Image: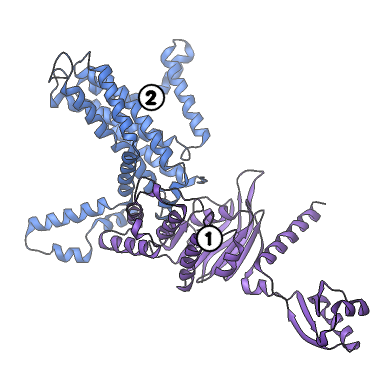
Amino acid sequence: MAVIECIDLSKSYSRHVTALKNINLSIEAGTAFGLLGENGAGKSTLVRILMGFIHPSSGRVRVFAEERVERAHSCIGYVHERPFFEMRFSGRAYLTYLAKLSGLWDHTNHVRVEGLLERVNLQEVADRLLGTYSKGMLQRLTIAQALLSDPDLLILDEPTSGLDPRSQWEIRQIIMALCNQGKTILLCSHNLAEVEVLCDAVGILRRGQLILCGAVADLLHSQDIVEIALADELSARDVVSRLGIAVIGVQANLLCIAASSQPAALSALVQAQIPILALNPVSRTLEEVYVRATLVSHDASLVAAG
Amino acid sequence: MQLWSVTMLRWLPLDEEMNELNTPNLPTTIYLFLLQAWRRFWRMPTFTVARFTIWSYIRSGWILGDIIFIWFLYAFLFLEFGGNVSYFYGTVGQGLGILAIMDTVVIVQRSLKTTRLYLPLSHLSSRSAYIRGLIMATALLRIPLFLLMLLLAASHHRFVPHVGIQEATFANMLPGAIGLLLNCMVLSTLTVVLSAPVATRLIQIGFLIWLVAVLYANNNLNIVAHYLTISHVPLVPLLSCYNLGLTASIDGYGLVMVVLAIAYIIGLTWLADFWLSRRDLILW
């Protein structure tokens, strides 16, 4: 079942500013989906539409099959990229208030608030004013408030942005535990390594368009580059110069070729009776996938612009 | 029809509560029923937002500014001059009206215009409860501030110690208190309605044009001003409520005007709810 569905979703702020263009996206239950994109790509706009804070200009959005997404708020936990708190309240008091808004009162409220304070490791400072909290503590509190109603969907807008490595690690552990619980997660982040570790699928936004979307495993192991290891420690450079094979790169006894030129390269090697030790598709990091996708999109837009 | 049924059902006790109510003792039954009804009322998101907004305003220290303003008002208007019931409502009405607008601007600035809004909204199933709670908070704040002013003015002034407001009785103070509080609540509600992001710039400009028309009609005697006096019509209930304090009495016409002022508050709240539900909340 799709938890989030966007169908031809567009958002324009004015005639000249289009934040999202015809986004089609479906996120299944239990998926950890990473939303990537440079600043101004439209990530926050998409998240705000999914939360019902802003309305789409055209197209449709459904969260838990609700077109009026505000009605699904009881099933959604939300972490804003720049949370702004009531600094003169304690962490416990503020969480208690938000729990009451979620319909949790009396014993249920107390148990849930205390449990979450413990889970995000804020129990010892729970009675301190929020004004005295560090950024990491505030971010952990934001995550705690997102979990108050035990939601099935978590929308996390840059949850580790601006935090020190230790705090980032702590928050990543919390998110990882939520992933393991089978929660559906939409994670917006600039931290590609984080998305690679936490997410099952990613979408890359550029200038309001979803330029790439798919499972992380598929994107990282896409077989468009193949690595051929030559046996007998033959010099790849010599072989390339002798046979005139089109390569992307050479290193010691390794040939890197485009998957499309794999048949031609193999037949040349067989004809020349050069033994092959191994042939493997090349894995890439998410960073490489991201840079490649955005560069291709950039080049395409330059071509289109003439 | 369906909405009313749902609303009524929410106020009826749950099954387990009905079991508690199935006692032979009628007063206990009524007591339990009222207790449950009160609990449901108290736990409505609108009231939760209103309580938190007031508490947040107090903790932020802005309430001290209000108290100082009221003390200055008292010192300026009553310490030297004193006065009777008409004088009290005539002068205090304007002072507390200005305070209602200033307070509301501060509350709206703190609650509606920053990303602070996103977290409570993400826990609510609509924006209605939030905006209603905010309007309720700004309106309810008028009561303690009025009582403080009343206490100061009634308790002491330099020439007539212990009888601050001359000839004041409960009967002749009550109509003015109702009128003054209603006027202040209308002003605070109107301030919320006209604030961004509830109102668009076009609506704000429209309101200012109406205000200019009112002032022009008030201060000129030419033909344009004559026709613009129609812009005074919406102010009739507010002026009537103001007059309740000056006359220290309430008649049938006054009662109608009180009902109209209450209708203004309800109507403006509905308008704020309607407008906010259509706005994009792009906050930083």
Among all residues in the image, which is located at the extreme top?
B221
The answer to whether residue B73 is above or below residue A46 is: above
Mark 2 belongs to chain: B
**Residue identified by numbered label 1:** A165
**Do tags 1 and 2 sit on the same chain?**
no
Total marks shown come to 2
Amino acid tagged 2: Val
Is the residue B78 above or below the residue B283 in the image?
A: above
**Would residue B25 be found to the left or right of residue A270 on screen?**
left
Between the residue at mark 1 and the residue at mark 2, the CA separation in whole angstroms equals: 64 Å
- Choose between B273 and A287: the one closer to the eye: A287
Disc 2: which residue: B233
Residue B155: where, in percent of width, then height?
16, 23
Query: Which chain wears blue?
Result: B
Parent chain of label 1: A
- Residues at badges 1 and 2 in contact (C-beta under 8 Å)? no
Q: Look at 42% across and 36% down and name the residue there.
A: B193
Which residue occupies the foreground of this view, A262 or B85?
A262
Is residue B4 rendered to the left or right of residue B197? Answer: left
Q: Secondary structure at mark 1?
A: helix
